[in-house]
Amino acid sequence: MNLPIKTLARGLPKPFWWLVVAPVLASVVYFGAVARDVFLSESRFVVRSSEQPSTPGLGGLLRGIAPSVGSENAMVVRDYLLARESISELDRRLGLREHYRRGDALQAFPAWFEDATLEQFYEYLPKMATVSVDAQSGVASLRVKAFSPEVAQKMNEAMLVMARERIKTLNEQIRKDTLGIAGAELTLARQRQAKAEEAIYKFRKNEGVMDPERQATLELQAGQEMRAKVAAAEARLQQAQSVAPLSPMVRALQAEITSLRASVASSSGQVVGAKTSRAAGAERYTALAMEREVSARAVAAAEDAVIRARIENERRHLYLEEISSPLQADGPFEPRRARGILAVVLISLLLWGVASLLGLGSQEHRRGNA
């Protein structure tokens, strides 16, 4: 039985050996003994926020065309996970470069004629870890391939942890953006209010009155009452002078009128006229009271702005929600050994068939020329 096989082997042309037999044998050796098993760990997540944008009218019709807010946030996380900073952190936590060196010649890191530098690893790892984002639903699929199921699962879990850390950083940036300005305005408004209150306190302490306006009103009323007393005393004086000009009552009334007029003049000088009068003090107090009222309104407006900023911060708060957690693979994802060998056989036979047709065509052409 060996004789027909040897005869058949000798009868095969050399191109057949190179185009069919050699590739098939190489594929059998590679897939059967050389190729390392590759294990897959997959997880899915979505980046959500409390924000619920309304898209009425034409916006609602275009919602199915434009990317959703969740997909934009997931794309930010995707870009972060595949950035050099993240790859370097993953290598530091899990020792990935050492792990991927254990692969076969076609899959291991580094590739042929390359150094095992971190720069080369930046280009290698995105081939083993991919993040795809659905633009409509915003669902992100994280697929990690490694040469052991434990490493694939740990790497997937580590990338999810890093994604949460990134979202935490984004939330902190959002909080600073929304609350930082409002908080600074509130601090300035409270400082202004404190200065206004301090100015009123110093004014009252120096002037010795609580409310100069009210004090001036009371003193004006007292001055009017004194003027009325002066008028009444003058009337009594005229009556006494007409009846008994030499009466002691006339002198008493004249002394009373002089005293009342002095009191009226003193009271009028305190209320109006001088820079230190009640009127001038009331004017200064009115300006201080107006400043205090304006500063109080500014504080109220700033506090309202802080409340709105907190609501905005809660509305824009991001969080990562896992749809499916990474599990440990119970079998290799790659290589598909039988399929790979069969593909090599079919491609080799196809190449042999093309080469044979070209050879027959060349022979016919030479015979025709002969």
Image (cartoon, rainbow, N blue to C red):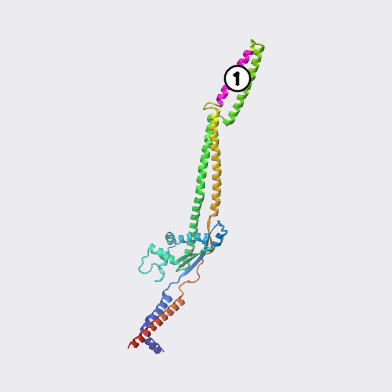
| Kind of element beneath mark 1 | helix
Tell me the quarter of the image containing the N terminus. Answer: bottom left
Expressed as whole percent of the image width and height from the top left, the position of residue 202 reads: 52, 32
In the picture shown, does residue 101 fall above or below 242?
A: below
> Is 184 left or right of 115, judged from the image as shown?
right
**Direction left: furthest residue:** 370
- Circle 1 crowding by C-alpha within 10 Å: few under 14, some 14–19, many from 20: many
The residue that mark 1 highlights is: 260
**Residue 2: x %, y % from top left:** 40, 88
Q: Main secondary structure of the magenta part?
A: helix
Question: Would you say residue 258 sits in the magenta stretch?
Answer: yes
Q: Which residues are magenta?
A: 249-270
* Image position of 122 with respect to 4: above or below: above
Residue 351 placement: quadrant: bottom left
227 and 122: which one is in front? 227
Which image quadrant is residue 89 in?
bottom left
Could you tell me which quadrant the C terminus lies in? bottom left
Viewer-closest of 247 and 23? 247
Residue lying at 52% horizontally and 41% vertically, measured from the top left: 190
What's the amino acid at mark 1?
A: Leu
Residue at screen point 60% across, 28% down? 218
Q: Residue at x 44, y 80 (%)?
A: 346
Please state the horizontal and vertical placement of residue 306, each as a whole percent of the image.
54, 47
Q: Is residue 127 magenta?
A: no
